[in-house]
Image (spheres, grey):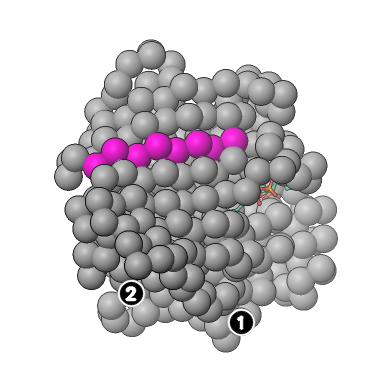
Amino acid sequence: MKWAFVGASNIASEWMVGAVRAVGDEVVAVVSGSAERAQAFARQHGITQALTDLGALAGLELDAVYVSSTNDQHEAAVLQAAALGCHVLCEKPLALDLAAARRMVEACRAAGVVMGTNHHLRHNSAHRQMREVLRQQGLGPLVSARVSHSVFLRAQLQGWRIDNPGAGGGVVLDIAVHNADSLAFLLGEYPVEVMAMTQQRGMSRGVEDDAMSLWQFASGLCAFTHQGYNTPHASNRLEILGQQASLEARNVLNQAPGGELVWRRADGDLSLRLDHDNLYVRGLRELHRAIAGQPNDLASGEDGLKSLAVALALLESARTGRRVPVSYA
Ligand code: NDP
């Protein structure tokens, strides 16, 4: 497929250009708000077209658009892609509010194109193995889930994320959406109600850089999630706890493949072998399967809308000090 990239971003540069090429596709254009950034990005990655206007995409032969501008700008790019009949892979969070996310999903549906959300973590081999164990009832009745997902934001990423709520900054929109997608991928459900507390703990200004939350699922299961920006020496952890056994994945919540997975059972701990494929490449293969109408594990636009709904409910809970039902409408 021929792709246009909207957003001369870090993620595009570090992971997605390579991932698109690894699946045999081509990046033919990059669109940036700045001509210098567009040209620099195009030069760096050997891309022919450096553009500053979404409208210019209409003049190109394209099959797909990857959107990795700041979160407030995703909608315009997705609507343009849908209008051009292009498949879309949009970064998370899809938008800053549910109405925008709904417009994006609807536009792609109406245009008959596939829309994916770049929730890459579900493509870590640990997630897929955990889902398999859960499908086989390998933990007995489930009790709870815990997600420790506090990172240190490297200097390069300490821009709009830590001081610009208008661009969609803050750790909840950034990381809690991934946690919602990971748990939904494993458990097959999204929370119905959440509570959260947020704080500014030395990294951010005007948005939260640390958040603790409790989630209640319709099945009765409860989850705890911690997401943060200012903990340089923390490992990350994803655990599902059952009455008979538990699964503990360590350091699988990263961009790069890696980590380990242990199935703790009455007869001892069993380390499960992980195949450490590039998560973004695997995500693009799933997008290709979705486009071909084959069974796939792509996080869809609707999945992105739901993960955003969870993050918005967390922010409302933190603001009001109340338990908040999650609205997916
Ligand atoms: P960046 O800050 O690198 O890029 C976002 C936008 O900021 C770019 O599109 C660019 O705008 C502008 N920008 C980039 N560099 C500069 C600069 N030096 N000066 C001024 N503006 C600049 O963001 P990320 O790559 O970290 O994130 C982009 C999107 O991807 C977000 O939605 C984020 O949530 C998501 N993301 C997803 C990840 C995943 O694993 N799924 C991981 C990381 C991010 P322009 O295009 O106009 O040039």
Position of 10 with respect to 117 (left or right) is: right
In magenta stretch: residue 307? no
Q: Which residues are magenta?
A: 221-228
Which residue, as the protein is rendered here, is positioned at the far bottom? Answer: 24
Res. 111 image quadrant? bottom left
Residue at 55 percent of width and 82 percent of height:
23
Q: Secondary structure at mark 2?
A: loop
Task: Return the x and y of residue 112 as percentages of the image width and height.
Answer: 29, 67
Task: Return the x and y of residue 86 as percentages of the image width and height.
Answer: 43, 68
Does residue 96 sit above or below 240 in this rendering?
A: above
In magenta stretch: residue 222? yes
Whole-angstrom CA distance, mark 2 to mark 1, is 18 Å
Check disc 1 and report the residue beneath it: 22
Residue at 82 percent of width and 60 percent of height:
40
Does residue 147 sit above or below 311 in this rendering?
A: below
Q: Secondary structure at mark 1?
A: helix
Quadrant of the rendering where the C terminus is positioned: top left
Amino acid type, mark 2: Asn
Residue at 57 percent of width and 75 percent of height:
276
Within-10-Å neighbours for mark 2: few <14, some 14–19, many 20+: some
Res. 288 image quadrant? bottom left
Task: Return the x and y of residue 270 as percentages of the image width and height.
Answer: 44, 70
Position of 97 with respect to 159 (left or right) is: left
Amino acid type, mark 1: Ala
Check disc 2 and report the residue beneath it: 296
**What's the magenta bit mostly, secondary-structure-wise?**
strand
